[in-house]
Each structure stands twice: as structure tokens, then as C-alpha cells.
Amino acid sequence: MALQTNNQRDSFTSKAGVIAAAAGSAIGLGNIWRFPYVAGENGGGAFLLIYIGFIVLIGAPVMLSEFLIGRSTQSNPVGAFKRLAPRSYWHLTGFLGISAAFFILAFYTTVSGWTLEYLFLAFSDGFAGKDAATLNTNFELFRTSGLRPLLWQNIFMVFTAFIVFKGIKNGIEKYTKILMPLLLLIIIILSVRSVTLPGASEGLLFLFKPDFSKITGKVVLEALGQSFFSLSIGMGTLITYGSYIGKKENLGHTALSVSAADTAIAILAGVAIFPAVFAFGIAPESGAGLVFITLPLIFDQMAGGYFFALIFFVLLSIAALTSTISVLEVVVAYLSEELKLGRKKATILAASSVALLGVACTMSQGPWSVLGIGDRDLFDLLELVSANVMLPVGGLLIVLFVGWFMPKPLLFAELSNEGKLRARFKYTYLFIIRFIAPVAIAFVFLHGLGFFSLFGGGDL
Ligand code: PHE
């Protein structure tokens, strides 16, 4: 059983292309900027353990579910639900994803803009001879200055739009296939450098030795949010990419490889960052500024620092770019397929409307700090709501849909490529997405928000 296919559609051309693009989406600032700082704030080793548990038990199955929805319908997230469940409300899940795309891109391009500034600083040897206090002040001055971060942010948006503009085969696939191997190489070089620093073992202990007394409802929810954010799941990015995957690819393998690659890169980022953080006596809980304040300090103090700083910020920019294109593609696919705008018009419209929210987000860091609630500015709110609320809710709806509503013959046909693959894991997968994943997501989510306080949740 299969839905009618559309041969006119742009698509990925090879297995390597699919993996590069999907891993490119997953591997991003989430791994290199967000994972180390969230792990640092939530206890290190214990967080890592729960995080990996969520990737295996929930993340990879949600990813596979998105691929299945996308490839079987060859549609954007809204169109996909409309095809699979006509005359129902399921397509609102697609709209939830499109709103999440706006939220994520807004704060993500803010951080991507910081990355470009720091790449520029690294290039011009701007960290030389600065102590921690100066680097901290400089980061704060830059972040809150309005115009300069705004400029970088929009330059980044233009790069993103340029690739998306070119389409799947000649844009996304082509660039991710070049950039992803480069990224892998750079992160390996950095990790080797970091673990060979004197005193590195303390950082490795922090990352790998679980301290279970650190686990609270908040830590568990943060781990769930981080696993969704890092895998790019819960908002239709991988429904969209799935819609461009050829009928011969093994979706189960693809989901597993991408999840494994994403986790490996997050751990490598931890290995690159924590030993250095500890070797130079910096607090691992330094928050969102961790890679922008502590790393320049570390680079300045270590042999070959100029070179390592440069490649680190190249790494961060590449990682960010291969992710922002996947988020923008969600909006572009929707606009071009559902509203029948041409790809070029859709890209311009999507990029410029996202940029507007992005402006507000960057400005909320300084000049427009009134944009916020309590001590959280717009940036913090967008990050918190998208990662810890929208993605888990989206993921919950996706597994419920595939587990309980998608016609079983269609689901199994898609999993096994019309019977050509054995797909022996199909009943385990079905059991996970019907029972384990939904219950776990709902529990962690409600608990983290403080609905029940079994082990003290609710302090988001
Ligand atoms: N996974 C990306 C990262 O880790 C961020 C992302 C989230 C991309 C959601 C797409 C969708 O940086």
C-alpha cells in the first residue's frame, strides 16, 4: 500500500546525501553551544545518562516516525497530515511545527550571528591577552549592543536563504555533503587537543561520572528538551526532509545513523569543552556564554590557540548553517506547496518574516529588553518554549499519530520499502511509539512543568 508519488519533486540523490543533510540538521549549535552549557548547568554525567536514554527510547523512534510521515506523503508537515488524515485536526500539528520553526530560527540566528562575530574576532586575533573579566564584559557589551549582532544575524540569514533558494539537490544536499565531513574533522582535532591538556581528567569526570543526587524534575525535562532539540525532532523538519528521501532508502537505518552521529558529536563537543574548562579553572555552569566567554580565554592560554580558536568558530558556523537551512526549509516547503508560491518567492518571504522575529529576539538582549517576562527576555522565552514545550508536544502528537492513526498497512509498507526489507524491529518500534514514548513524554513534560511533584519538579 502506498500513496501516489510525485516524480516532479526535487529530492536527495544518494544515501550519503540523505545522511549528510539529516545529520547536518541534527548536528548544530544544539550540540556544540547548547549541549555543553545545559549539561554544565544540570550536573554533567547524570544529565548525559538521561539524555542518552531519551535519545534511544524516544528520540530515534520519533525521528523514524517523522521520516515515515514525510516519505509516505512526499509533503510538507501541514500537507502530510492533510493527506494522511483528511478532514481532521491533525494538520494543526504541522502548523505547530511551522510556529516552532519561527521561534527556533529567531533565537538560533541570534546565536549564529554571535558565532560570526567570534569567527571574525578569532581571525583578527581579538582574544589575545584578555583575561576572563574582560572577555566577559566584551561578550556582554557585544550581545546587548543591538546593531552589530543584528548585522551578523542578518548576514547569517542571507547565507541560509541562499542555500535553501537553490533547492534540495543543488542546495541542501550539495553543501551539507561538503560541510559535514569538515565539521567532523575539526571537532576531532579539538577534542584531541582538549584531552591532552594538563588537568583534563577532571573535565572528563564531570562529563562522564553520573552524580544521581543532581537529578530533579527540571533536569529530566531539560534532558528531554535537549534531546528533541538536538535531533531536530518534534516540529516537522524531518517530515520535510523525509519527503525528499527516495523510496529505496532504509528509513530505520537512516534514523539510527543520524541519532548516533548526533549523540556522538554532542559527546565529542563535551570532550572538547569540559576538559579545557576544568583545566583553566572555569565554572562549567557558565550558561549560554560558555563557548563565547570561556573558550576564547582557553584558546588564548593554550599553545596553538590562534589556530584552534579559528577552526572552532568555523566549526560552529558550519554546524549552525546546516541546521538553519533545515528549519527554513520547513517554512519554505509549506509556503511553496500549500500556498503555491514558487520556491524563490517562498524562500524570500520565509526568510524575511523569520528575520523580523529574529530582530526582536536580538534586540531583546539589550535595547529592547522590555520584551520579556520577569527576568526572561524574548530570547530566553523562545528558547525555553520551543525546546521544552513545543518540540515535546509536537513529538507526542507525531508518535500518537503514527502509532494509533496512520493505517497499519501503509506504515509497514513504508518501514519495509514495500516488503523489500525485513524490518524485523517493526513490532518493537510500534510498541515504543504506541506506549513507551507517549507515556514518557507526557510524564516528563507534565512533571517538569510541576503538575505532580514526585521528586521535586516544577522549577523550570
Ligand atoms: N538540531 C539542531 C541543533 O542541534 C537545531 C534544530 C532544532 C534544527 C529543531 C531543526 C529543528 O542545533
Image: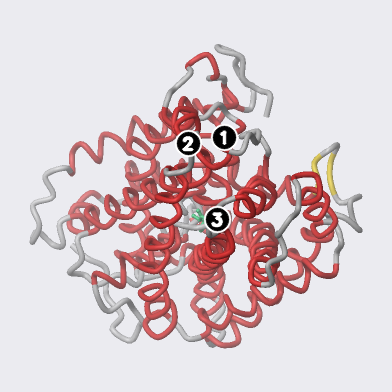
Amino acid type, label 2: Ala
Mark 3 lies on residue:
29
From the viewer's perspective, is the residue at label 3 or at label 1 nearer?
1
Crowdedness of circle 2 by 10 Å Cα count: few (<14), some, many (20+)?
many
Is residue 393 among what the camera can see?
no
- Whichever of labels 2 and 1 marks the residue nearer the N terminus, that label is 2
Q: Residues within 10 Å of mark 1 (few under 14, many from 20)?
A: many
Q: How many marks?
A: 3
In the rendered image, residue 149, in percent from the top left (x then y), is placed at 77, 66
Q: Could you tell me which residue is drawn at 59 percent across and 79 percent down?
A: 159
Q: Nearer the viewer, residue 406 or 121?
A: 121
Q: In this rendering, does residue 18 appear at all?
A: yes
Tags 3 and 1 touching, CB below 8 Å: no
Whether disc 3's CB lies below 8 Å from ligand 1 is answered yes
Q: Which residue is mark 1?
A: 278
Disc 2 to disc 1, C-alpha distance:
7 Å
